Image: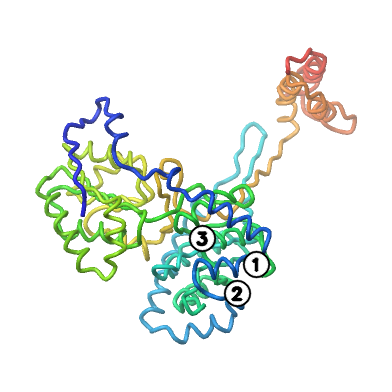
Amino acid sequence: MLRPIDLRAFKKGSDNQALLDMLPRPDVVADLPTAGVLAILDEVRGGGDAALRAATSRFDGVQLDDIQVPPAEVALARTRIAAPLLEALEVAHGAITHYHERSRLVAAQEPYERDGVSVAEMCVPVQRAGLYAPGGRARYPSTVLMTAVPARVAGVREIILCVPPTQDGSVDDLTLVAADIAGVQEVYRVGGAQAIAAMAFGTESIAPVEVIAGPGNMYVAQAKRAVSGVVGVPSAFTGPSEVVVVADSSAPVELAAIDLVVQAEHGPDGLAWLITWSKELLDGVTSEVARLVVESPRRDDLEATLGKNGYAVLVSGPEEAMEVANHIAPEHLELCVTDPGSLVPLVRNAGAVFLGLLTPASLGDYVAGPSHVLPTNSSARFASALSVEDFVKRVHVISVSEQALALLAPSVAALATAEGLPAHAESVALRLTRPDGGVASVSPDAGVGPDAGVGSAVANALDAPTQAQ
């Protein structure tokens, strides 16, 4: 089930890029259903609710009357949830909220001050955010929490959720209760690329949003890419699930194997890689994964994922293992080794890192606190986990003192004049020469008053020939 790759000839520090480039990886560009997604976006943009109903019938086999789930149905769902499940949702919600509130506070900084220039950052939340939670092969109330909580902590006033309907046209009770706990105001039974189109462009039932977040299949991920710029979309490509398990000979075979299966059971198009420098462990994990697949109720999904993107890689040591892991840039990276902390400084590309045998990726999927909406398809090379930052705009608030203006005006005038923008230069010159204030009120003792030659410096800059093209 896991295809072996022997990379023991690969040595850290030597020129092995060609060898790394030969490692099997999904061809993101070739695999994307670009044409089909663009067609769906055009249909919804032009057809509104009617196009949503047609697409839901075509792709989900469901005839919709009401696209939005009525609030009364959400309230009723809570009464149908078993107490332990309700408690688990509350525990997860509390952990996720605490993490994001703390990260927001840590990120807050004092205003920047330098020579009379003050710059503060004002975090302004978007007005309306659209979230997506998968619902085809399984229900994902955890994804609702992982997307809605950072939006709520960011201060977003209107949060909506799109989720594919079940075969009877309903939305799973647990998903509805998670949405209610997290403060989602509107839930729509629409999935796929058509849901992304509805949130980006708006329909008769769904008002457009400013940001869209949440994982999905290739159609959903590609649709988000296509509408990026119309709305804000976090830079990570949040597609099918991925895991890389780096393990040494101390790792129990059953733990390494089950952690590969955990992410693979999300369905096709993901990846699950074991990287080790122990041949004995590699053989044992490969056999154990095969056994788990045969016995799993999600055998079809496991075989689809592992048959296409399941590998067991044998390397010569831990540094080489980390080089391979960084090349893959996985969504989840587990370090199942004796001293996981020693490998952390070698991590360059990963959505989230899980240290040691007590920290499986499944913990991060539910209750660790950070969002489990992580970069996939190698986008961990440049992107991060979903956070409060994805739902706010950072607005710079700048002010200067009179002395600072006097100091900086000549540079502004010189640069503006060189760029052929005389009004820019004039805007500072006027402030320095006003009879009712400006540089005349600055003490000569500061070395920046009229005696310091500021006015003549600005005048000279205004008179200088421009080099702008």
Residue for badge 1: 206
> How many residues crowd around disc 1 within 10 Å: few (fewer than 14), some, or many (20 or more)?
many
Which residue is painted at 23% across and 49% down in the image?
Answer: 274
Q: Along the horizontal axis of the image, is 459 left or right of 278?
A: right
Q: What secondary structure is found at the residue carrying circle 1?
A: loop
Of callouts 2 and 1, the N-terminal one: 2
Quarter of the image where the C terminus is located: top right
For this orientation, the residue located farthest to the right is 435
Quick check: 156 above or below 238?
below
Badge 1 amino acid: Ile
Of callouts 3 and 2, the N-terminal one: 2
Instruction: Name the foreground residue: 169 vs 206.
Output: 169
What whole-number distance in Å separates the C-alpha atoms at marks 3 and 2? Answer: 23 Å
Report the number of discs.
3
In the rendered image, residue 158, in percent from the top left (x then y), is placed at: 63, 66
Q: What secondary structure is found at the residue carrying circle 3?
A: helix
Residue for badge 2: 68
Of callouts 3 and 1, the N-terminal one: 3
Residue 278 shows in this picture: yes
> How many residues crowd around disc 3 within 10 Å: few (fewer than 14), some, or many (20 or more)?
many
> Can you tell which quarter of the image residue 443 is in?
top right
Which residue is painted at 75% across and 23% down in the image?
Answer: 416
Quarter of the image where the N terminus is located: bottom left
Residue for badge 3: 150
Which residue is painted at 46% across and 63% down in the image?
Answer: 146
Badge 2 amino acid: Gln
In the rendered image, residue 243, in percent from the top left (x then y), is placed at: 31, 52
Whether label 2 touches label 1, CB < 8 Å: yes
